[in-house]
């Protein structure tokens, strides 16, 4: 038996080896075709690579790898090496390298605005890249090559509000970290129709720039004359130096300092003494009493007035520390002892993470009693916080907020409806609308009927309800009102585009029966003639 088994095993192995290699592999390979090259990622990669030769006119550019992700709207260059031509540097003496350079935009599934994000990681600037006149100063700081651990720029523009948020940050190894932010409530570029010239303006909520010491002060202080950094010396040096800067900025016709500028100088002296005693950070930020502050072209021509509008201040601690939620109140919130009148402010801070550490669970717990009382601010905040975790409850809250003067919740309604089935959406609308049918006063005029239909469709003056909107639009259309008929048809289009034509047909039949019943039972033609 052993000899027979050996013969069989040998035969099987021989047959297997005799088979072509591709016959042994499963599944079979798919041959590469021209269509494999036609993808958005490949096309975007080709566009980026075609731009590189243009850069090489200005500098020698090399990179190890390019990574393109069209879904995330992201492009990354890895292992970057740039050697620009500089008249004061020999050949390739100036080298700028980086671990990675990443550019990204708005993900394709988020279309609420524009976004641009730039991140430079692990960058090194050779000492020879510096202008010759700057090298002695940098050398005295004990720096050979300038190392930028990370630099970021983030720009976000919101379509709905017309506002934007701009952030940047740069972290210089063993020197300093510089960061800043600009919160714009609205960016205006209206045109003067007579002159056909654009009148740009920005509405500023807040601006801030922060310099964090990471060794720069220690290096710079070694170069300072003896006694220059003493508190008494700072009180003498700083006011005159900053006053001269402000006077030059104000212009020859307005050299006298404003109250806001004098206040800034006083704060600068205090800040300098605090920083010398404990080198940490210096923060300059706006503190306008009323925001947003409108800045137009005329303000750029009057720096003194612009300074007064923005009211910048300087310190070693951000104002948010002083204007945020005190730790004692947060402890009360955690223990369930916070006074009810503080629930809204503390809850808002906890949900946004501004003024308090973000804690969605605690923030929702504080706002829930207010939402039950029908406070629109609370329902709006809760809807936005819960849109990703519980779309059904978020939709119910957004319905209330939108109908009670919170237009920001209207766009949230539309987004949430894409996540709900038709029956789920209509059920929530019915609950929020409440029981009871139309009463005689609802049919006061054709205009009232049309406004009821439009209000229930939009959801800004009444609870959004596609059932109610369709009912009133059908009644109005029966009177010959063209606008009401258009609303009715618009609802049908909404349902068709949702892919819910069949499910809506059942609801539609019930509503049409109800309209006919009321039309006859209430004798609406006679009522509307009165």
Image (cartoon, rainbow, N blue to C red):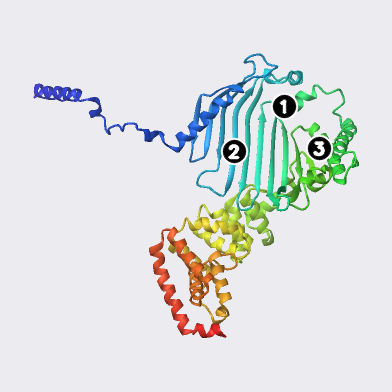
Give the mark, 1 or 3, whose residue is nearer the N terminus. 1
The residue carrying mark 3 is: 271
Separation of marks 3 and 2 at Cα, in angstroms: 33 Å
- Which residue is nearer to you in this view: 330 or 180? 180
Going by the image, does 519 lie left or right of 11?
right
The residue carrying mark 1 is: 215
- Identify the residue at image location x=72%, y=37%: 210
Relative vertical location of residue 90 with respect to residue 114 in this rendering, above or below: above
Going by the image, does 200 lie left or right of 41?
right
Q: Nearer the viewer, mark 1 or mark 2?
A: 2
What x and y, as percent, mark residue 234? 87, 32
What x and y, as percent, mark residue 12? 15, 25
- Identify the residue at image location x=61%, y=44%: 156
- Which residue is nearer to you in this view: 330 or 289? 289
For residue 430, say whether it is visible.
no
The crowding category of the residue bearing disc 1, from other C-alpha atoms within 10 Å (few below 14, some 14 to 19, many at least 20), is some
Give the mark, 1 or 2, whose residue is nearer the N terminus. 2
The residue carrying mark 2 is: 117
- Identify the residue at image location x=68%, y=60%: 339
Q: Say what secondary structure mark 2 lies in.
A: strand
The crowding category of the residue bearing disc 3, from other C-alpha atoms within 10 Å (few below 14, some 14 to 19, many at least 20), is some
Q: Which of marks 3 and 2 is in front?
A: 2
The crowding category of the residue bearing disc 2, from other C-alpha atoms within 10 Å (few below 14, some 14 to 19, many at least 20), is some
For residue 493, say whether it is visible.
yes
């Amino acid at each position: 038996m052993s000899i027979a088994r050996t013969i069989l095993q040998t035969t099987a192995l021989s047959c297997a080896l005799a088979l072509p290699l591709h016959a042994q592999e499963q599944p079979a390979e798919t041959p590469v075709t021209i269509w494999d090259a036609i993808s958005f990622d490949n096309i975007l990669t080709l566009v980026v690579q075609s731009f590189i030769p243009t850069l090489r006119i200005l500098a020698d550019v090399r990179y190890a790898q390019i990574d393109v992700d069209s879904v995330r709207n992201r492009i990354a260059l890895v292992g970057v090496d740039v050697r620009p031509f500089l008249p004061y540097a020999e050949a390739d003496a100036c080298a700028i390298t980086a671990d990675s350079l990443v550019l990204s935009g708005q993900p394709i599934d988020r279309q609420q605005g524009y976004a641009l994000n730039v991140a430079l990681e692990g960058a090194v600037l050779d000492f020879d890249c510096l202008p010759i006149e700057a090298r002695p100063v940098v050398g005295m700081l004990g720096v050979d090559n300038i190392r930028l651990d990370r630099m970021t720029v983030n720009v976000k523009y919101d379509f709905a509000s017309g506002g934007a948020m701009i952030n940047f940050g740069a972290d210089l190894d063993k020197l300093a970290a510089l960061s800043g932010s600009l919160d714009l409530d609205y960016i205006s570029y209206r045109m003067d129709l007579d002159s056909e010239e654009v009148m740009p303006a920005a509405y500023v909520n807040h601006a801030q720039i922060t310099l964090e010491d990471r060794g720069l002060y220690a290096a710079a202080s070694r170069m300072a004359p003896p006694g220059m950094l003493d508190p008494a010396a700072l009180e003498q040096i700083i006011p005159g130096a900053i006053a001269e800067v402000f006077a030059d900025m104000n212009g020859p016709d307005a050299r006298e300092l404003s109250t806001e500028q004098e206040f800034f100088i006083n704060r600068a002296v205090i800040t300098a003494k605090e920083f010398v005693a404990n080198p940490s950070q210096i923060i300059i930020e706006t503190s306008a009493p009323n925001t947003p502050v409108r800045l137009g072209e005329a303000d750029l021509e009057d720096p003194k007035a612009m300074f007064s509008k923005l009211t910048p201040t300087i310190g070693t601690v951000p104002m948010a520390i002083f204007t945020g939620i005190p730790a004692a109140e947060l402890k009360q919130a955690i223990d369930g002892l916070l006074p009810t009148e503080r629930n809204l402010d503390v809850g808002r801070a906890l949900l946004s993470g501004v003024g308090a550490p973000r804690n969605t669970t605690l923030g929702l717990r504080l706002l829930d009693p207010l939402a039950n009382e029908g406070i629109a601010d609370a329902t709006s905040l809760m809807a936005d916080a819960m849109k990703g975790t519980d779309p059904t409850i978020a939709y119910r809250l957004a319905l209330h907020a939108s109908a009670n003067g919170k237009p920001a919740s209207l766009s949230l309604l539309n987004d949430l409806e894409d996540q709900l089935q038709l029956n789920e959406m209509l059920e929530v609308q019915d609950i929020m609308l409440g029981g009871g049918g139309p009463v005689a006063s609802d049919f006061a005029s054709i205009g009232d009927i049309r406004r009821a239909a439009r209000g229930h469709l939009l959801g800004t003056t009444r609870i959004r309800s596609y059932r109610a909107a369709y009912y009133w639009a059908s009644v109005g259309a029966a009177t010959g009102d063209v606008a009401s008929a258009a609303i009715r048809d618009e609802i049908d289009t909404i349902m068709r585009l949702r892919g819910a034509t069949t499910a809506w047909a059942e609801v539609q039949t019930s509503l049409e029966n109800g309209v006919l019943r009321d039309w006859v039972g209430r004798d609406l033609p006679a009522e509307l003639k009165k």
